[in-house]
Amino acid sequence: MYPRNFKLIWPSSLEEALEAVEAGAVPLAGGQSLIPMMKLRLIAPESVVYLGAIRDLDYIKELNDKFAIGALTTHSRIASELREGSPLISKAASEIGDVQVRNMGTIGGSVAHADPAADYPAALIALGAVIRAVSKNGIREIPAERFFTGPYQTALDHGELVMEVVVPKTACSVGYAKFTRIATDFAIAAVAVRLSAHDGVVEDISIGISGVFAHPIRARWIEDALIGKKLADEVLSRAINAEVVHEVISDPRASKEFRLKAFRAMARRAILEAYENSKV
C-alpha cells in the first residue's frame, strides 16, 4: 500500500523546520517509523517536513562529564562511537532492528516516536538522560523519566522538536537485557540498569524498563529493595518478584503473564550483569 498524497517540505534551516511543524507538518527523520505507518495509512499527514536536510543535528559532542547526541545521529553511529564513553546507550543502539534500520534510523526520531517497546527509553531512563526540545520559543530540557507519557505519547508540546539527547559518561556499571520473539524485533521486555557498588553493597541503582507497560518507566520498587544490600540470590529474587506496581500490558506478541515472566528474567539478567561489572 502507498501513502496518501502529501506535501514534502525540504527546510534549509532548523528555523524553517520549526515553522513547518508549528503549522502542522509531521517531522520525518530516518523514516523507520513514520514511513511504514504512512504506507499502512495509519496516519495520513497533509504535509511532512524532512529533518534529514538539516545536517547540523547530526553530531556527538563531548561536554565535560556528558555527551550531547544530535537528534539526527544514527543508531549505528551511537553504537560505534559511544561504546567506551557511554556503553549503555551504545548497547541499546546496537540492539535496534537490523543493520539497515540502524544505518537509517535516528535517536531523535525513535525518542519522539515513543514506541513503548523501543530500546532507547529504558537506557535513557536508567542513565538519567535529558531530552532537549526546541521550538520557536527556545529550548526546553525534559528528564527522560518524564518524557514518555503514554503509548506513542511524549511530553513534547505542539511545535517542539527533539534537538538532542544528553547522556552521562558512565562512571557506574551498566547492564542491558532484552527479550524478543526474533533478534530484530521490538522488545517484549527490555531492562536497562546503572549501578554502583562498594564492597559488594549496592550504593545506587537506576532501572529503566521498556516493552512491559503502557510506556517506559523507572522501576523504583526494585531499586528500593536493593539499595544498601549485597545481591545475594534471595535478595535479588525478592526484589524482582515483588508485586508490580503498574499494569502489565497484553498484546498479540505476548500475554500479560508471559510478559511479566520475561520482564523478571530480563531484570535479573541486567542487574547481575551490572553488578558483576562493578567488581571489575
Image: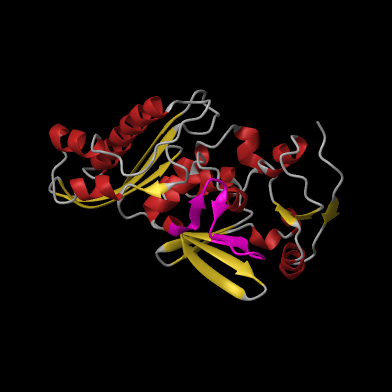
Horizontal placement of 145 versus 107: left or right? left
Residue at the image position 49 percent from the left and 63 percent from the top = 62
| Along the line of sight, the residue nearer the viewer: 210 or 104 | 210
Q: In the displayed structure, would residue 59 be above or below residue 37?
A: below
The quarter of the image holding the N terminus is top right
Instruction: Confirm whether residue 87 shows in the render.
Output: no
| Closer to us: 20 or 273 | 20
**Residue 82 at x, y percent in the picture:** 48, 50
> Which quarter of the image is occupied by the C terminus?
top left
Q: Is residue 273 above or below residue 166?
A: above
Residue farthest along the bottom direction in this orientation: 137
Image position of 49 with respect to 35: above or below: below
**Residue drawn where x is 54% and y is 65% of the image:** 132
* Residue 23 position (above or below residue 107): below
Stretch in magenta: 146-164
Q: Is residue 86 magenta?
A: no
Residue 12 percent location from the top left of the image = 80, 64
Q: Residue at x 25, y 37 (%)?
A: 240
Q: Which residue is found at the position 35% from the left and 32% from the top?
A: 266
Asked if one can make out residue 234 in the rendered structure from this viewpoint, the answer is yes
31 relative to 125 in the view: left or right: right
